[in-house]
Image (tube, rainbow, N blue to C red):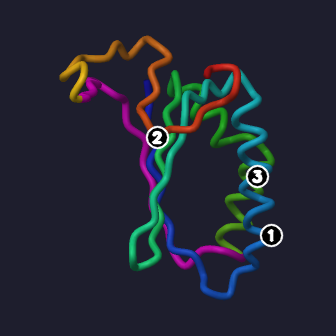
Amino acid sequence: MVVGVFSVRRRQDLDQAAYGRLNDRMWDIVSSRHDFGLIGITGYRSDDGRSLAMALFRTREGMLGWKREVEHAAAQQRGRDEFFLDYWGFAAEMVDAYEFDQAGGRRDVALDSTWRPAGFEGPAEIR
């Protein structure tokens, strides 16, 4: 499994409706294309306005396919031109995964599974 982490600060004057439509379109593409291998995605926003998104993919090849997808590449450029003050990101291979809850305790998770951490939204066919 591979995780992509992306952090951005948005411009205060951005067109929220246009940004929302673009996000919805990107979700439609990445969640419907099985070749990308998206497992799930989640995000957070800090008090200073910085947001952080984390996306889990089955393989590095799938993640790179998403990165290079034509509409996604155009959306990235639009983000730089219209929406973002700054951003950073990275991808990493997962080497270990585990989870804990009071009822079940701590347990290791197999990385070759379709495991998705609580709070990650995934494509409908994986649910």
Q: Nearer the viewer, mark 2 or mark 3?
A: 2
Mark 3: secondary structure: helix
Q: What residue type is labelled 1?
A: Ala
Q: How crowded is mark 1: few (under 14 residues within 10 Å), some or many (20 or more)?
A: few
Q: What kind of secondary structure does the magenta stretch mostly adopt?
A: strand
Disc 1 vs disc 3: Cβ atoms closer than 8 Å? no
Q: How far apart are marks 2 and 3 (CA)?
A: 18 Å
Task: Estimate the x, y position of residue 40 in percent, counting from the top left.
Answer: 55, 34
Q: Using residue 102 as the reference point, say whether residue 126 is left or right of it.
A: right
Q: Is residue 61 magenta?
A: no
- For the view shown, which residue lies furthest in the front direction? 103
Q: Mark 3 points at which residue?
A: 24
Ranked by sequence position, the earlier of labels 2 and 3 is: 3
Q: Using residue 96 as the reference point, say whether residue 120 is left or right of it.
A: right
**Identity of the residue drawn at 72% across and 52% down:** 73
Mark 1: secondary structure: helix
Q: What residue type is labelled 3?
A: Asp
Disc 2 vs disc 3: Cβ atoms closer than 8 Å? no
> Depth check: 67 or 31 in front?
31
> Depth check: 88 or 20 in front?
20
Q: What residue type is labelled 2?
A: Gly
Q: Distance between the residues labelled 2 and 1?
A: 26 Å
Ranked by sequence position, the earlier of labels 2 and 1 is: 1
* 65 in relation to 19, above or below: above
Q: Is residue 96 magenta?
A: yes
Q: Residues within 10 Å of mark 2 (few under 14, many from 20)?
A: few
**Identity of the residue drawn at 43% across and 41% down:** 91
* 42 in relation to 3, above or below: below
Q: Quadrant of residue 61?
A: top right
Q: What stretch is highlighted in magenta?
A: 82-101
Q: Any mark on residue 119, and which?
A: 2
Q: Any mark on residue 18, and which?
A: 1
